[in-house]
Image (tube, rainbow, N blue to C red):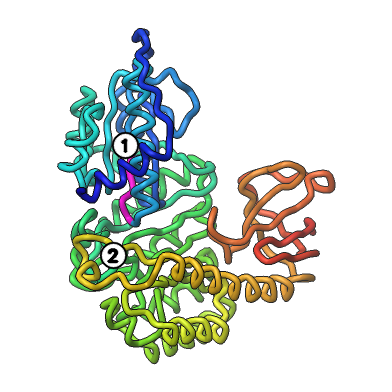
Amino acid sequence: MKFIQWFISSAVNSISLPLRMKTKTLLKPKVHVVTLGCSKNTVDSEVLMGQLRANNHEVVHDSDDESSSVVIINTCGFIDNAKQESINTILEYSNHKREGRIDKLIVTGCLSQRYRDELKEEMKEVDNWFGTSEMPRLLKTLKADYKHELVGERLLTTPSHYAYIKISEGCNRTCSFCAIPLMRGKHISKPIEEIEAEIKKLVKQGVKEFLLIAQELTYYGLDLYKERKLSELLHRIADIDGVEWIRLHYAYPNKFPVEILDVVRERSNICNYLDIPFQHISDPVLKAMKRQTDKAEITALINTIREKVPGIALRTTMLVGFPGERKEHFDELVEFVKEVKFDRLGVFTYSHEEGTSGYELKDDVTVATKKKRAQQLMDVQQEISRTKNEEKIGLTFKVLFDRKEGEYFIGRTEHDSPEIDNEVLVKATDTYLRVGDFANIKITGAEEFDLYGEKVD
């Protein structure tokens, strides 16, 4: 059985898809964009919707509104769980098409880029398949023109006060577990002037926080300018009036450009926050992962980061269950996390990805062991997070509020990225706060991943 056939079979066996036909009704010419996967996919969908709106198409995003006649699914193909979610979603909307509830179904994004030929064979209800860099062709199928003059024009799907800024596409690294280069291609930096123009437009729309994202943030500029330019880019963004927070995501530890730490420390509107995935710490595992670094270099880099930017919040991700990861390698990772005490940490279990060099290795860690190790590492991090949060009680932080939920206003400090990090909760019955505004909050209570506070003048 082919790789994709297995996923489709699993999806069909796990969900009930009625095959009855409905009489097709006349629907409004509306496009529904469904986004799966990471923040980079979010940006792609926002740009696509901006282009459609400029071509006078009515557009909705991740909506329960069933009046759309066209559905575009922007898929993720990073790991097994993401692939399964993408295939389940395609099957769901394929059923809608069979029932006559939609007229056209289009699939784009990473899964389509990687498995287009197999998917075409198995999912006949889909009208068109597009890869990650085929937006002009996609638009053409909807009788829309790709408007090059719309630099930075997007329809935000995030709350209106923050936005993701993709500063580059693709990756030149060759990590043995990662399929991103297969789906996104080589590293291509976006020109500094184009990024500035995009941010200035978003500031005029009320955006205050800008989360810089890329497959490899610190590689920025090497292809365009023949040298790393992240430091210059940060200075130029920080100079834009109205930019209140800048946040850095997905830095690579090998050949880390230490000079950006000086910029983070010097510029008050760059958050003391750095997302830098280390993936592991045991040298044999790092070597097998082709991470181009080792434990000594990682430890030295962490020390340098904390020395140059006191109080910085370090977020990382770890990958457990890689082929050949023995108990002693995992135990070394656990001890390292206990010692370093990352402020934020996420854990992935290894997914055996065809086309990667890791796929040539025997996937010899059982699924049960992978899950057990992931949970053990998160249990360790939970205690670290609880201790760090309890140390914040009595301190006051500048907090940006994202939403009101139940009886609480919910926001974040500069040490927290939306959706993945800790949150600050303030009782709505005690204080009125506006979503999208900053406020000074004194911390009065703490849990593992939440802080509680009250507004102070």
Q: Residue 115 location, x and y as percent? A: 21, 47
Going 53% across and 63% down the picture, which residue do you hit? 269
Which of the 4 image quarters holds residue 5? top left
**Magenta residues, as a range?**
74-78
Visible residue check, residue 358: yes
**Around disc 2, counting alpha carbons within 10 Å, would you say few (fewer than 14), some (14 to 19), or many (20 or more)?**
many
- Report whether 238 appears left or right of 141: right
- Report whether 274 appears left or right of 431: left
Q: Residue 406 location, x and y as percent? A: 73, 41
Judged by depth in the image, the label closer to the viewer, 1 or 2, is 2
In the image, is residue 281 above or below residue 172? below
Q: Residue 323 location, x and y as percent? A: 31, 74
Which of the 4 image quarters holds residue 11? top left
Going 41% across and 59% down the picture, which residue do you hit? 212
Label 2 sits on a secondary structure element that is loop
Q: Quadrant of the C terminus?
A: bottom right
Q: Residue 137 location, x and y as percent? A: 17, 34
In the image, is residue 93 above or below residue 43? above
Residue designated by label 2: 178
Q: Nearer the viewer, residue 7 or 209?
A: 7
Residue designated by label 1: 48
In the image, is residue 230 above or below residue 80? below
Q: CA distance from mark 1 to mark 2?
A: 26 Å
Q: Nearer the viewer, residue 38 or 167?
A: 38
Going 45% across and 78% down the picture, which residue do you hit? 262
